[in-house]
Amino acid sequence: MLGQGQPTPHELARERFHAYFSGPITVGPGRFSDQAKIIYFRGLGGSTQFRHGDYQMAIVFPTDPTAQTFGVAVLEDKNGNSSGILGFDLTAVPNAVDRLGRPTRFTYIQDPNIYSGIDFVNSSVGTLEITYSKGSATAIFNAKVYTSGLTSPIKNSDLYARGGRITPRSGR
């Protein structure tokens, strides 16, 4: 359903995505020889797509100081009816770090292997801002998230509520 032309103003508004999450962070060792350490994030929040959500994120610091810092973020709608899950592949913005050397800004694209429910067919591109506090962090995601609108498990809930009867919009 992606068109070849420019998106309409309505489509641009539909794709606008904002999410915020806060929660604890922990630092662990790298899991492979080319990883110096990993910061793990988890927390609660919400978005323009879902009111209550969970997130988990990991940022990998490479052993090579010239290599790119990267990570993965997974955002989940707590409403099991929508089954919405978004996964983002993160790339750190060079030199955007706090006074302790922790990355504060990322760009991201949709991870093609992490999706579910309403986000089954999606395309995403955006930015992430992280602010750190004692043992916790707040993550703010801003993006364009395209979904086809055809994979929502709750799209036909109104039909079930009427016992499958289809009534005209005019009410006649």
Image (cartoon, rainbow, N blue to C red):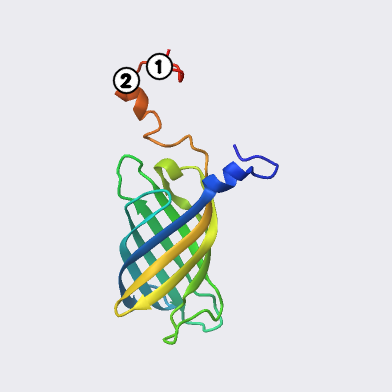
The spot of residue 138 in percent (x, y) is 37, 69
Q: Is residue 54 visible?
A: yes
The reply to whether the C-beta atoms of the residues labelled 1 and 2 are less than 8 Å apart is yes
Q: Residue furthest right?
A: 5
- Quadrant the N terminus occupies: top right
Where 50 sits versus 169, above or below?
A: below
Measure the C-alpha gap from mark 1 to mark 2: 8 Å
Instruction: State which quadrant residue 23 falls in.
Output: bottom left
Inspect the image, locate mark 1, and give the three-letter code of the amino acid beneath it: Ile
Q: Which residue is mark 2?
A: 162
Where 162 sits versus 50, above or below?
A: above
How crowded is the residue under tag 1: few (<14 C-alpha within 10 Å), some, or many (20+)? Answer: few
Residue drawn at x 39%, y 28% as measured from the top left: 156
The spot of residue 26 in percent (x, y) is 30, 75
Q: Residue furthest top?
A: 172
Q: Which residue is mark 1?
A: 166
Inspect the image, locate mark 2, and give the three-letter code of the amino acid beneath it: Arg
Residue placed most toward the observer, 2 or 141: 141
- Quadrant the C terminus occupies: top left
24 relative to 127 in the view: left or right: left
The spot of residue 168 in percent (x, y) is 45, 16
Residue drawn at x 39%, y 61% as measured from the top left: 20
Q: Secondary structure at mark 2?
A: loop
Residue placed most toward the observer, 27 or 102: 102
Q: Is residue 34 visible?
A: no
The spot of residue 71 in percent (x, y) is 45, 67
